[in-house]
Image (spheres, helix red, strand yellow):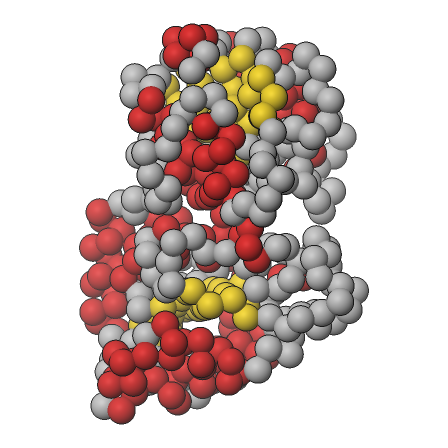
Amino acid sequence: MDERWQRAQRILIIRLDNLGDVILATPAIHAIRARLPSARLTLLASPSGAQVAALDPDLDEVIVYRAPWMDPDHLLSQDPSREASMVAHLRRRGFDGAIIFTSYHQSPLPAAYLSYQAGVPLRHAASIDGPGSLLTSRHRHPEKIMHEVERGLDLVGGLGFEPSGDDLRIEPHAADHARMNALIARCRADGPVVVIHPGCTCPSRTYPPDRYVEVARALQREFAAQIFWTGAGSDAPIVEQIRQALANPGISLVGQTSLSSLAALLAQADLAITNNTGPMHLAAAVQTPVVVLFALTNPPAEWHPWKVPHRLLNQSVDCAICYQRVCPFEQKCLRDVPIGDVVQAVSELQPSRWSERGAA
């Protein structure tokens, strides 16, 4: 390992996209912590991703930053003073080094420039572009398909932070475990507990509400499932539309959970059903099997749930892999996933236990 990194005591870890992306970076963060146990590790993250910091024991603090180069919906106004303020804030903190995490289709150079302006002396990232002096060390990933967890571990491995494991690092608070355990105990019927998270910030990855209605009916009919609905407050209209179409609407916790309490709920559930979104990775982090309505906007091999039993459901289409936020083709890769395929996936993940409950 470079001696300068061995001496580093204040490290800025930059991951500026979404919740799931930060969750997938936790094994790499743990590798840094294992090699530098006394260092102060600070996460620079989006408002969504910043939530992970409270549940990752390897992080000491978080700085929230909405970066204009991570603004796909163009919600940020042009305001150079905002970026100047963040540069000044980072400069005052006196970081020794910055490690910039990006997925393979993102450039680390805007974050590298932010760090450069803030006077961070060590700046490390993977880049296929010529970084000039923006990076003090430039990593190159192998030319092969890599899961996002593996990319993160490979990135820090390039500095000598060898992994001590590759498990996702999420620890819900004990109080949330107790609260969710009590809630499930009060509501548990004969069937299994299934958490369904039908929302997603990316419209092209969102399984249609009318299909979730059919999924819920099938789970209740086949397995006597007790369904808990989760989501952000903005998901309430969609979830209520689904629940109103059901004879047994299940229990809605939409807008009522923190990331910790959602993780605690998922940890105690028998199964989760989601789109390709952050809670998919949260379920994996707490080792709950997950069925994913996985739109072919992104490569499944790089973004599937990590180290947990799972099934990815979609339909083969010529337009995969498109990276579109809004699908121009009526979600052909997702909308026509048969409900029978969802039921089959559920059966495969919990065959004997679920069959016994459904027959009770």
| Quarter occupied by residue 295 | bottom right
Residue 168 visible? The answer is yes
- Where 310 sits versus 11, above or below? below
In-image side of 157 versus 80 (left or right):
left
Q: Residue at x 38, y 79 (%)?
A: 347
- Where 220 sits versus 317, above or below? below
- Assign the C terminus to one quadrant of the image: bottom left
User: Foreground residue, 234 or 157?
Assistant: 157
x and y, in percent, of residue 264 in the image: 30, 55
In-image side of 273 versus 329 (left or right):
left
User: Foreground residue, 88 or 318?
Assistant: 318
x and y, in percent, of residue 145 in the image: 58, 47
User: Foreground residue, 226 or 75?
Assistant: 226
Q: Residue at x 59, y 44 (%)?
A: 144
Q: Residue at x 74, y 71 (%)?
A: 330
- Where 205 sits versus 116, above or below? below
